Each structure stands twice: as C-alpha cells, then as structure tokens.
Image: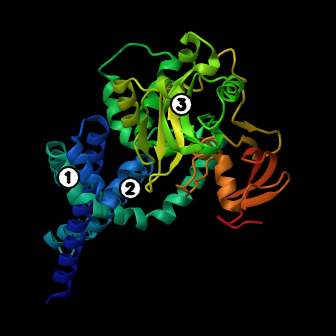
Amino acid sequence: MNPPFLNLLLSLGAVALMLLLHAYLVMSEISLVKFRYSELSDEELKRLRSRKGIARLMDKGDQTGRVVRFSKTLCTVAVGLFLLPIVRDLLGSFDPEMTPNRWSVVALTFLCVVVVHFLVAEIFPRGLAMRDPVRGIERSYRVLLFFQVLTLPAMLFFRRVKSFLFRRMGVNVGDELNPLDLDVQIRALGEDTVSLSPVVRTILGKTLQMKDLVIHDILLPRNQVVVYDIEDSVTENLERMKDAGHTRFPICKGSLDECFGILHIKDFFRFEGDDKEVDPMALKRNIAVFALDTPVEEALERMLRAKFHMALVADEFGSTVGLVTLESILEELVGEIQDEFDIEEEMIRKLPIADTYKISGLAPLHEVEERLEIEIDNDEVSTFGGLITAEIGRIPARGEKLSTYGLVITIDDVDDRRVIAATALKSSVAKGVNS
C-alpha cells in the first residue's frame, strides 16, 4: 500500500476516533445534567445505581464534571492536530510544486474542525442524551471512566495549580461551581432578571450541591447521641434530657441498636400526673431508618412527606451508626442554625500560623475537604474526629500527633468517647502514614 495513502488513512482513523470519544463524553455529560435536574423513576434509578461505575459518576458529580470538561478539551485539540497534516496534504495535492501557505492551512483546518466537530461530536450525541438520558449514560459511561483514569495525573497537577492561583487572586476554591451545573445556570441568566441577594445566591448554590451529598456526610455519630434509656429511671432520663437541651430523643433499651421510636419532650410536659408514673412507651412516636448511602435530597423529601424530624441511620449490616435530623439537612442549605440556647462554635477556624487550622471533632468531613482544599478518601466516617479515631484505631490521647491525608494533626481536646478538637497543619506528608 502506498505510504502516503496509509498515513492518510491512519490520520482519518485517528480523527474519527477522537470525534467518537468526544461524542461519548458529551452523551455522558448531558445525561448526568438531565439526572440532576429531572425526576427519575425509582426503577430507573435502581437500575443505574446497580452499576458501580455509573453510581460513582453520579455520586461524585463535581469531580465527574471536571473530568468531562478536561477530556473534551483534549479530544478537540487532538482532532485539530490530526486534521492539520490531512488539510496540508490535500492543499499540496492541487499543485505538488507549490508549498501551501501556512496560514491557509491553519484557517482551513480550523474551519473543518469547527464544522465536523460541532455537527458530529456535539449536536448528535447531545440530542441522543436529551431524548433518552438513561440509555445515553449506559452507552457512554465506560468511556468517561476510562478518561477518569487516563487524566488523573493531569487533574491532580492542575488542581494544585488552580488552588495556588486562586489563593493568589483571593478566590475561595469552595465557591467554584460544579461544571455539571454550569449549562443550567448560564441558561437561567436569561430567563429571570430578578436581582438575587447574596443570601439567596448562597442558598441556591448549596441547593445545587446537595445532590452530591449522602446521609453519611451529615449524620450525628452514635457515640454523640443522647437517648432515653428505658433501663434507667424516669428521673435519670429527664435529668439527662434536661442537660442535653434537645426536644427529641430516641427511646432505646441500652443502646441505639434496640430503638423503639422517638420521644418528644413536650409529651412529658403534657402528661397529667407524677413524672414517675409516666409510661414512655405509650408516648413514643414512630421513627424512620435510612441507609448510609441514602441521598440527602431523598431523605429530606421523605422526612417532609412523613413529618419526621429525626431518623436513625444504619449500615449495610443493620447496625445503627447514628442519626440525622431535619435541622441538620436544612443547615446544608442555609448554613448553621442556632438559637439563643446554642453555644456558637466555629467548626473550622484559620489560625495565624500559615496553613494551620483549629478544627472541631464534629466538623463534617466534606466541609474539611472544601475548606482545606484536600481530598479525604474514607467512606467509613463522617466527622473529623471520627476520621482521627479511625486512622489511629482508638481514642487518642491529648497532645498525640497523627500524619494523614496531607495533614499533621495534633489532638487538642478529647474525652473518653470522642475527639473534641484538634489542630491541623497542611503538609506534604504521604496519605495514610501515621506517626
């Protein structure tokens, strides 16, 4: 076979491959956007989540969106590079003795890339995904998973560069929008000219981010839950409830593993007679139970529909690992809700020393990741104190140090059940290595 003809076939094949990969990426992107802003039936959602690859892409929408955008850029650049010699050879074939003008080659290549790329790799796959997003993601998710692995080193490098540049510009990395939300938000600019206050904009942003959260991210661990224990006297339980200052308490026998329902403090106030004669089992109300991986959005919908303010959270073995309240979910939308009886505590506080933070043991891990611009790969715990205990394997001692996930952590305050507070210094210490 003629070598120039063979080179032409190889170049055309490479262009076709890049266009095909780009089309699959577009199909994945539009399908995921449709999932975020439209209702899926329970059957469709269950079918999608039965595939671990699709479930991971849906649960980590922020990371997925950035991989899609970066990978699409790589494919587009590759199409241009592979087309450049094809256009040059075609122009040269008209007059073999004349060298094609460089700028004519560039201009014609650019025109070809725009037309072919837009028609084949954008419009067609976008239409397929919009018509049937479920089928679209099922056809294309493997390509996106491939690019997720392929671009991992580059994504990590550019993430560090982005964090450095944003800090220099005084921009908070946590304010960056999820790429999967950009299309919808940009389109919405022309649909509504109402001026929104900063508070409303913040709530809207948090609402869009809620799709990335599951119950595991916001639960209150079981060792911090105050319960009404039927094995104790009414007087002891009332004293415990008074000290806690809450209004609702799980009614249990010994621990959360044997829970019968919820007690509301108002029901005790309404009881006519001696407190010692009250039957807590007669006052209890039903309680819901969520799995650890239940989406926060789904939990909110179910709690509002059933008028539940508190629910237990169980792991895959049925053991209760904590609880979630309606207030904790709403705080993900509007920020921390405090009344006159709450003691204000900043969960994550920047210290004067460079890259050093004072962090409460109750600080949610996703907030620690966002504020410190790090990534913590641990799905077993939901709070910073829980992470420390899990890494060490026990309740640490005050003053003890730990190096993990790029942080040097010093335990500042601890009791016999949990880590109360710690100081974290960002470092280059290797992930998961304890000192």
Q: Give, as a three-letter code, the residue at label 1.
A: Gly
Q: Give the side of residue 31 with respect to residue 273, left or right.
A: left
- Residue 302 seen: yes
Distance, label 3 to label 2, CA atoms, is: 24 Å
Who comes first in sequence, dot 2 or dot 1? 2
State the image quarter where residue 182 is shown.
top left
The location of residue 114, given as percent across then percent down, is 24, 51
The location of residue 107, given as percent across then percent down, is 27, 54
* Mark 2 vs mark 1: in front: 2
Who comes first in sequence, dot 3 or dot 2? 2
Q: Which residue is mark 2?
A: 56
Q: Which residue, as the protein is rendered here, is positioned at the far right?
A: 399
Distance, label 3 to label 1, CA atoms, is: 35 Å
* Mark 3 vs mark 1: in front: 3
Q: Secondary structure at mark 2?
A: helix
Q: Which residue is mark 1?
A: 136
Distance, label 2 to label 1, CA atoms, is: 16 Å
Q: Give the side of residue 152 with respect to residue 166, left or right.
A: left
Identify the residue at horizontal 20%, vertical 66% (top origin): 16
